[in-house]
Image (cartoon, grey):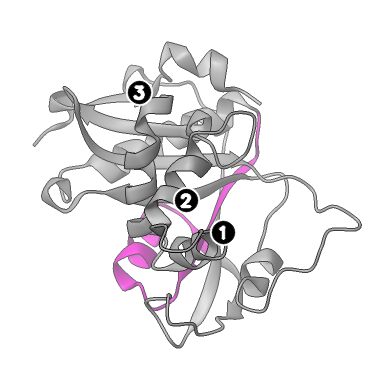
Amino acid sequence: MIRSTFDIRWARPVDAAEIARLFLMSSDGLAAYIWSRHAREDEPVEAVGAARYARTGAAFSYENCLLATRGDEVLGMVHAFEMPEPENEAAAPDRVLAPYAELEDPGSLYISGLAVHAPFREHGVGGTLLDYVEALALTRALPRLSLICFEQNALARDFYLRRGFNVADRRPLVPHPCLHYTKGDALLMVRPLMEAPHTPETRLPDAAVANTD
């Protein structure tokens, strides 16, 4: 597959279930843990996630998600939003989530999830989605990108290192049966951005105007 065989577009409400499926893949079990805390009896966590991303006016919404598509098929997604300053009286997160709250980078464009379905990996889909996130950050005059990655997820970690991210901070993860890893650290990875003109390949879709904060 080459770049010309897929398109990048903003997600729509109808994409919420697909976004949830990709989030379960990208989060290495963390999304499953969070959604399970809100699930009704016998409700699949994927349904909780779909409802979460069908919302509007929230950070975790389809409005902040770009999709790589080929026709009606979704190949992958990236979800990103500006990380706000912490609230003075914010409730303390539970023990499992505490390390990730401590690794937030206010003022950055936070990549909360990037995932590509297995058949479409190694074809530039993830890298192209990351190019579009950089364009989005520059459009919003944000100085850097940030994300949190499990140290033990070597494929993801090394991908971001190749793309110019550096490890800025780390916290030991708190093991839980939902998480894919039981040891190692959660890594805050940051990439500073330099002002640069957008190339045609990374020009944001027109619908981005409706998705700004």
Residue 138 or 104: which is nearer the viewer?
104
Q: Earlier in the sequence, mark 3 or mark 1?
A: 3
Amino acid at pointer 3: Arg
Residue 156 x, y percent position in the rendering: 34, 63
- Inspect the image, locate mark 2, and give the three-letter code of the amino acid beneath it: Val
Image position of 6 (left or right of 201): left
Check whether the beta carbons of the residues at disc 3 and disc 1 lie within 8 A of each other: no
* Rendered residue at 32%/50% (across/down): 21
How many other residues sit within 10 Å of disc 1, few (<14), some (14-19) or many (≥20)?
A: few
Q: Secondary structure at mark 3?
A: strand
Residue at disc 2, secondary structure? helix
Q: For residue 148: magenta? A: yes
**Residue farthest to the front, as pictured:** 41
Report the residue marked by disc 2. Answer: 48
Q: Are marks 2 and 1 in contact (CB under 8 Å)?
A: yes
Left or right relative to 121: residue 87: right
Circle number at residue 38: 1
Q: What's the CA distance linking mark 3 and mark 1?
A: 30 Å
Q: Which residues are magenta?
A: 141-166
Give the percent coordinates (x, y) of residue 129: 35, 37
- Badges 3 and 2: C-beta atoms under 8 Å apart? no
Quadrant housing the C terminus: top right
| Relative depth, front residue between 134 and 171 | 171
Q: Using the image, determine if residue 128 lies above or below residue 114.
A: above
- Taking the image as shown, residue 126 lies to the left or right of residue 130, namely left
The residue beneath circle 3 is 9
